[in-house]
Image (cartoon, rainbow, N blue to C red):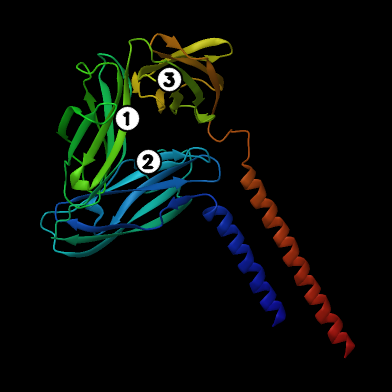
Amino acid sequence: MKIKNSAAIFFSALALILFSSSSIATLGVSPATLTFDKMLRGGYAQRSMLISTLSDAMNVDVLAEGNIASWITLSNQTMNISMNTPQRVAVIIQSPFDIANGNYSGSLLVIRRPLETPEIPGTGNIVLMSVRIPINVEITDVEVRDCTANSFSIASTEENVPTKFNVFIRNNGNVRIKPRITLDIWDQDRLNIVKFLEFDSDEILPTIEKETEREVSVDELPIGQYWVDASVPECKSSDLLTFDVMKQGSMTVRGKLIQIRNNPWLNLGDTAKITAIFKNDGEKEVNARFKGYVSLEGQIVKVLESDTINVPPGKIVELDTFFKPEQVGRYTISGKVYYEKKVSYESSSVLNVIVGKEKGKTSIFTIIYIIIIITTLFLLFAIFRRRRKHKHKFRQGF
C-alpha cells in the first residue's frame, strides 16, 4: 500500500510541476474576470485586460464565446507577446436595444499558439494552452449620470501665442455625456477677472476616461502671471491653476530621445515595430518627428520616418515606424528626433532576424523549469527507493 501511495504522490507531483511550468508561468491574463455593471439597453461599456508572459515570444488569439459573444468587440484579436512586450486589449460591450433587464454572461478564450501559425486557431491548428476569462454583464433601464474630473492644467506661453487648457474627465455612468467646463482667468492679485471662457467637453462614452483640450487665446493679456478657476460643475470638480504670459523667445526648447525600442528577435517575413521614445524637457510645446535608418553589415537597407506628433512640456511620446526585413541577419537601427529646428542625440538598437525557431537561445525560465523537474524527479525517486528498502529490511527482521 505504501508503494502505491508513493507512486501516486510521484505522478501527482510530476503532473503539477509540468502543468505549472507549461501554463501558469507562460501566459498571464489580468484581471481574471470582467464585470460590466448597470448597462443600458443599446449601451456601451469598455474594460481592458493585460496579456503577458514570462517566457519567449508567442502568438496569442482572443476569442469571444457564450451567449453574449455577438455583443463583444476586441481592440486586438491576434497579437504577438514576449516577456518585455505585454499587450493590452480593450474589451467593448455593446448591448442590443431589445434585450431584457437582467444578468448575462459569456467569456473570452485567450489561446497561445506556436509562432509558426499566424492565423486565428481553427481546424488543424496547434493550441499550446488557453485561459478562459468570464464576463458578467448587468442590463438595467435606469439611467446613471456620474463623472469625475482630474488633472486640470494650463501651460505658460509667450505673448500672442495661444496657451492650452487640459482636463481628464471619466464617465462613471451609463449614458454619453458632454460636461460643461468653465474658466475664470484672474489677474496676478486675484482681484479682477480678465477673461471668462465656457465650453463643452468632447463627448465621453460610459466607462471611458477622455482628455479634453482647448486653445486659450492670450492676445489681449499683457505679460505677467495669471490665475485660473477651472470647474466642471456636473462632475463636482474644480481646481485653481496658474500660468505666465512671457516675452517672445523666453521659453526654453529642449528634448531627449530616451531610447529606440523594438523586439530584439523577429521571424523572417514578419514586420518589426520600431518605437522612438521622446521626452519634451523644455517649457514650450514642440512638434517632434523621428528620422532614422536600418543597416545590415554597414549598408543602409531602409530609411525610417515617423509621423509628426505634438508634444506638450514634460510629456513623453512614442514615435512609431515599421520595417519588414527581406533576409536574416543582425540589423542595426539608428536615428534622431527632430523638433522645433533642433535635433536630439542619436540612439540605436539591434534587431536579430531569424528563420522559424532558430532563435539560438533558450529562455532562462525554460532552463529553470527543466532543472526543477529533474531535481524533483530525482528526490521523489530517492524517497521511493528508501521506503522500498526500509520495507524490505522490515520484512527480513521477521
Distance from the alpha carbon under mark 2 to that under mark 3? 39 Å
Residue projecting furthest to the right: 397
Q: Which sits earlier in the primary sequence, circle 2 or circle 1?
A: 2
Please give the residue where the numbered disc 3 appears in the rendered image: 282
Secondary structure at badge 3 equals loop
When the figure is inspected, residue 34 is found, relative to residue 350, above or below; the finding is: below
Q: Is residue 279 left or right of residue 155?
A: right
The Cα–Cα distance between marks 3 and 1, rounded to whole angstroms, is: 18 Å
Count every numbered label the image shows and give the total.
3
Q: Residue 55, percent across and down? A: 56, 44
Q: Nearer the viewer, residue 23 or 123?
A: 23
x and y percentages locating residue 238 in the rendered image: 26, 42
Q: Is residue 40 left or right of residue 51?
A: left
Which residue position is annotated with label 1?
242
Residue 241 visible? The answer is yes
Q: Nearer the viewer, mark 3 or mark 1?
A: 1
Q: Say if mark 2 contacts mark 1, CB within 8 Å.
A: no
Quadrant housing the N terminus: bottom right
Read off the residue under disc 2: 78
Q: Amino acid at mark 1?
A: Thr
Residue at screen point 71% across, 80% down:
2
Tell me the residue at 24%/60% (across/down).
67
x then y, percent, for residue 317: 40, 27
* Badge 2 density bin: few <14, some 14–19, many ≥20, Cα 10 Å: some
Give the label, 2 or 3, closer to the camera: 3
Asked where in the image residue 208 lies, by quadrant, the reply is top left
Tell me the kind of residue under disc 3.
Gly
Closer-to-camera residue (22/303): 303
Q: Residue drawn 37% across and 41% down?
A: 78
